[in-house]
Image (cartoon, coloured by chain):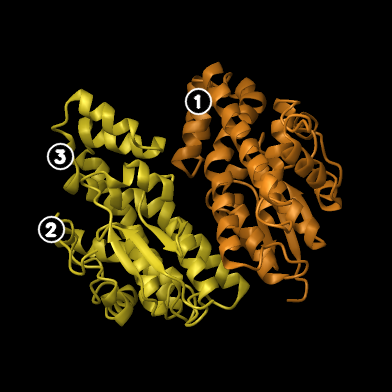
Chain colours: A orange, B yellow
Amino acid sequence: MSQPELTLYHSWISSASRKVRFCLAEKGLAYKPLKVSLAKFEHHSDWYKKLNPSGVVPALMVDGVPYVESNFINEFLDDAFPAPPLRPTDAAEIHDMRVWSKYIDDICLPAIQKHNWMMNYHPMARAWTDEQLEERLAAIPTENRRQVWYRMARDPYTDEELQTALNILLDMRDKIEARTKRAAWIVGDAFSLADINAAPYAKRLEELDAGAFDCANFPNAGAWWQAVSTRPGFIAAKIESFVEQGKPDYDPVGG
Amino acid sequence: MSQPELTLYHSWISSASRKVRFCLAEKGLAYKPLKVSLAKFEHHSDWYKKLNPSGVVPALMVDGVPYVESNFINEFLDDAFPAPPLRPTDAAEIHDMRVWSKYIDDICLPAIQKHNWMMNYHPMARAWTDEQLEERLAAIPTENRRQVWYRMARDPYTDEELQTALNILLDMRDKIEARTKRAAWIVGDAFSLADINAAPYAKRLEELDAGAFDCANFPNAGAWWQAVSTRPGFIAAKIESFVEQGKPDYDPVGG
């Protein structure tokens, strides 16, 4: 495939957006980033839901056609632009990469979300009137996300829930430690989408717990994180401070 | 890959097991089926959770190594045994196939589950003492499935919930009608995993609503279902009556 026109509707702080930015950078693909303001609920707007019916970021436009689901966007990029390869060549390892990426989505995403949303959205949502809340909820296309926003507005996560969520992310770190003890990367001997899809979670975990990837205590996970976070692709993807990138005026590249 | 030894831990009535049986049959792969009795909670036993930590069927053993997640098992089979191909060749269509298969898992599975579990497990679970219930729940590894079993025992789905679930499956049928109006199969012009992964849901929907694939009202979805359900692979996979196959002594092949 010759390079089509790529536009990424994304948020700087969204873990799923970060995964796709990382993959695009590793592929060396030029794209136009367009920021979707989560604080202004642009992802729940009618125009955006035409691109991504689930009302979540990111959506990758390829010659005007939207692609959704960050794990699958990244596999699509590897299908459409095979060099450099970001999936293992062995069928068993490809399967392992997919199951790992689904674990990141199904288990680690809801965990990180609890911390991120309490910081970014609870202070705003708690002030909404019942009418405002009802209006916000009516625009959200999925039951799961409606529940999360309800909790931000009226029933914030407890300290116990936040600790449980942190423990889930620490368990991810333990899994990475065990995997990178056996091989250089999360799945086997080559850098792959398994590493890319975990990277935004490692970045955020380190912000929540500064010692999470301490090389003295977690030598293999620590070395893995050092190797991932210094890659030119990681740096180009701007997976940076959650607090800084969450500020409304953060806009390093006009998108 | 020369053919390794394949063993499928499965249940005759489980939608995810049916997807994998269908794929194995389309590939012409010989395998040993081993029935996991859901009514006896064998899927929550320690030995089975070593194969599939989520405690759900199926698990495909490949030379003694377990593979989980039905959508990914089927992609693995296509990676490991490329002929006949069961994925599109176009990157955009492969992406569409993955998003469709995730929709089947995330949206249609919880819907079909409500009807299946009310029929199969509610009559048993409602009779459990609190102690029995607690013991059952303690063996279930995921929060989601604990909630479902709690509902079977103490808070069965309402008629309204069952109707909502049926509507979700009818909406799947409408999506199939729209897709097969544009092309012969769910994704493009070739039979693929998109069709395989939807087939067990179409079978069960037709049992719940005999007119769901009536060719007079849904000409394209009706023709699609006719084509799918008469394939030798579908027949070999024994995707048959839910009531018959749910009987404890149903055992057509010793597995």
Are the residues tagged 2 and 1 within 8 Å (C-beta)? Answer: no
Sequence-first tag of 2 and 3: 3
Residue A29 on image: x %, y %: 80, 63
Pick whichever, B198 or B9, lies toward us.
B9
- Splitting the image into 4 quarters, where does residue A114 fall? top right
Nearest the eye: B50 or B52? B50
* Label 1: how many Cα within 10 Å (few below 14, some 14–19, many 20+): some
Q: Can residue B227 be seen in this view?
A: no
Residue A166 in sight from this viewpoint:
yes
Which is nearer the eye, A212 or B111? A212
Taking A198 as reference, is A140 left or right?
Answer: left
Q: Badge 2 sits on which subunit?
A: B
Callout 3: chain = B
Mark 3 crowdedness (10 Å alpha carbons): few <14, some 14-19, many ≥20: few
What chain is tagged by disc 1?
Answer: A
Few, some or many residues within 10 Å of mark 2 (<14, 14–19, 20+) = few
Instruction: Identify the residue at horizontal 39%, vertical 45% (top origin).
Output: B49
Q: On the image, numbered disc 1 is attached to which residue?
A: A151
> Could you say where residue B92 lies in the image, as x and y percent from the top left?
60, 70
Name the amino acid, label 2. Answer: Asp
Amino acid type at mark 1: Arg
Question: From mark 3 to mark 1, how far is it between C-alphas?
Answer: 35 Å
**x%, y% of residue B48?**
36, 48
Disc 2 to disc 3: CB gap under 8 Å: no
Q: Residue A52 carries which label?
A: none
Mark 3 lies on residue: B124
Q: What element carries label 3?
A: helix
Q: In the image, is residue A231 above or below residue B186?
A: above
